[in-house]
Image (spheres, rainbow, N blue to C red):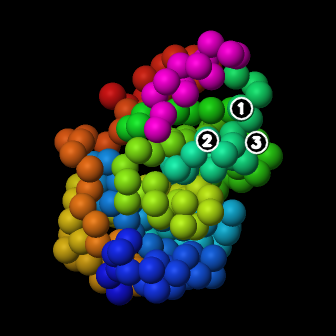
Amino acid sequence: MKFTLSDQAAVDSAINALRAGVLIAYPTEAVFGIGCDPSNEAAVSAVIRLKQRDSTKGLIIIGATLEHIKPYADWDRLGKGVQTAILASWPGPQTWILPCSPRARTLLRGSHSGIAVRVTAHKPAAELCIAFGGALVSTSANTSGAPPAKTVEAVEKYFGDEISLILDEPVGGRKQPTPICDALTGRVLRS
């Protein structure tokens, strides 16, 4: 089922589906993402299986506010200067690897000691997080190694009815997925 943010009944149904562990697809800054409730381990496992993704890689968590992603990251382990730099890039198309909190289970972080998080400025993704009341898993809508989906039609072609809910809104204007930087080391993992 396709839904838009202007159809409140459909949004409510999508939020209820997320809470029940259903996977959805939604637009992000550059591509469509597959999302679920990051606290639902069965749903996170389903994302990894659907994408045929190596579970050691970890996933990105997005939110509309810092409060949405704080449960998954240990914000207090960051120095004030690093916090200031991160906050200067958010909301926006910058993903940061932050120290994990205990809530960042292995399926979310993979084999890493940090977790990838972003406070998105992309309006449809941010509004979806606000409606959900928290963060969402955000990984590109494609099977591992294939080009990411940039349209609803591409999501449907990749996954058919395995993704039962698709937010039918446009992706942002970025040509490439968001850059990823490790907040503790400054190392750029994706530019």
Work out whether residue 17 or residue 97 is closer to the camera in this orientation and state it.
Answer: 17
Magenta stretch bounds: 79-91
Q: Which marked residue is nearer to the observer: mark 3 or mark 2? A: 2
Distance, label 3 to label 2, CA atoms, is: 14 Å
Disc 1 secondary structure class: helix
Sooner in the amino-acid sequence: mark 3 or mark 1: 1
Q: Nearer the viewer, residue 87 or 31?
A: 87
Viewed as shown, does residue 75 lie left or right of 63? right
Which residue in the protein does label 1 denote?
75
**Hey, which quadrant is residue 8 in on the image?**
bottom left
| CB contact under 8 Å: marks 1 and 2 | yes
Residue 145 in view, yes or no: no
- Please say whether residue 119 is visible from this viewpoint: yes
User: Residue drawn 55% across and 27% down?
Assistant: 87
Residue 101, which numbered label? 3
Mark 3 and mark 1: Cα distance apart in space: 8 Å
Q: Earlier in the sequence, mark 1 or mark 2?
A: 2
Q: Nearer the viewer, residue 4 or 167?
A: 4
| Amino acid type at image mark 1 | Trp
